[in-house]
């Protein structure tokens, strides 16, 4: 499985991607089979697994269970090194470039190497930007970094571009899980205009309209967690989202 190449291929055909985020801290193992069957029938193209605060071993158990029920790529979106498991297909190797905490710019990465060295995980370097959302998010609390101000568009755009120039393969604009407001179209548009690599947008997207406007503004991959956790019927609601053909066909 070449996750990144598949993302590039899909985007080059004008397709949009949807990642369902599963937080190991919130998903019970007994509920996985039912939840994943909903994911399989939906327009989702990837499963991301990760959270800000997860106990050791929990992510691996969850990933093993998810893999029993789907052929979609399972990509780690880790809040910490202890969430790394070789049972997944890939990992977003996140650099929190909106912040200035050296642990999340290089420290955790060095720690991760001894775990990654013996795995076959596809490592995808990702520049991760936390954008202010009006309330403190768990990423902000755990990473002890400040998000970028929404009205400081130039800093957001320049930070995203710096992330690309540093060699990241993806840029992720994050409002934070459960954000009260999703990232505005204007921010997505301006960032997208500058980038030559795919753009991920997530945090606080709870309606079909919000998803659609993120795509229209230029998001290549949208990540949704909370809205699916709270109401699995949202999977069905999204089926009519875009003309068929805009979502890649995939094996389930
Ligand atoms: C969080 O961007 C993701 O890291 C998804 O956020 O849970 O608000 O959908 P939500």
Image (tube, grey):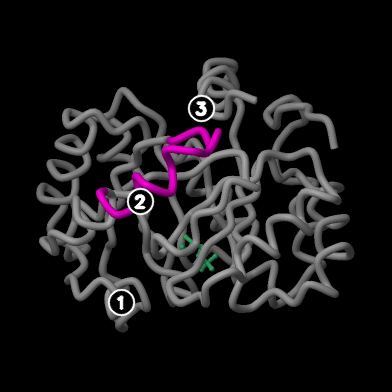
Q: Which residue is mark 3?
A: 4
- Tell me which residue sits at (11%, 47%) in the image: 154
Circle 3 packing at 10 Å, graded few (<14), some (14-19), many (20+), is some
Query: In the image, which disc is placed on residue 180?
Result: none
Q: Nearer the viewer, residue 223 or 100?
A: 100
Label 3 to label 1: alpha-carbon separation = 28 Å
> With respect to residue 202, does 179 lie above or below?
below
Res. 179 image quadrant: bottom left
Q: How many marks?
A: 3
Q: Let me know if residue 163 is in the magenta part.
A: no
Q: Secondary structure beneath disc 1? A: helix
Q: Nearer the viewer, mark 2 or mark 1?
A: 2
Give the x, y percent position of residue 75.
57, 46
Q: Which residue is mark 2?
A: 112
Give the residues drawn in magenta, as a range.
110-123
Q: Secondary structure beneath disc 2? A: helix
Q: Which quadrant holds the C terminus?
A: top right
**Nearer-N-terminus badge (3/2):** 3
Q: Let me know if residue 119 is in the magenta part.
A: yes
């Amino acid at each position: 499985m070449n996750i990144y190449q598949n993302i590039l291929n899909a985007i080059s055909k004008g397709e949009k991607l949807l990642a369902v985020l599963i937080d190991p801290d919130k998903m019970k193992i007994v509920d996985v089979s039912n939840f994943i069957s909903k994911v399989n029938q939906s327009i989702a193209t990837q499963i991301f697994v990760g959270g800000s605060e997860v106990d050791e071993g929990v992510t691996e158990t969850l990933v093993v269970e998810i893999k029993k029920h789907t052929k979609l790529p399972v990509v780690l979106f880790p809040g910490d090194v202890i969430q790394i498991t070789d049972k997944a297909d890939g990992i977003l190797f996140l650099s929190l470039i909106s912040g200035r905490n050296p642990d999340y710019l290089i420290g955790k990465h060095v720690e991760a190497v001894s775990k990654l060295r013996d795995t076959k995980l596809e490592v995808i370097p990702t520049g991760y930007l936390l954008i202010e959302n009006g309330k403190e998010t768990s990423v902000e609390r755990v990473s002890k970094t400040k998000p970028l101000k929404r009205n400081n568009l130039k800093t957001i755009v320049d930070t995203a571009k710096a992330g690309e120039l540093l060699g990241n393969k993806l840029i992720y604009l994050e409002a934070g899980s459960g954000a009260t407001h999703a990232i505005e179209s204007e921010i997505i548009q301006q960032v997208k205009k500058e980038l030559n690599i795919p753009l991920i947008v997530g945090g606080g997207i709870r309606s079909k309209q919000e998803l659609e406007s993120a795509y229209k503004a230029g998001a290549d991959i949208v990540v949704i967690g909370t809205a699916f956790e709270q109401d699995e019927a949202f999977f069905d609601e999204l089926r009519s989202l875009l003309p068929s053909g805009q979502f890649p066909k995939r094996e389930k």
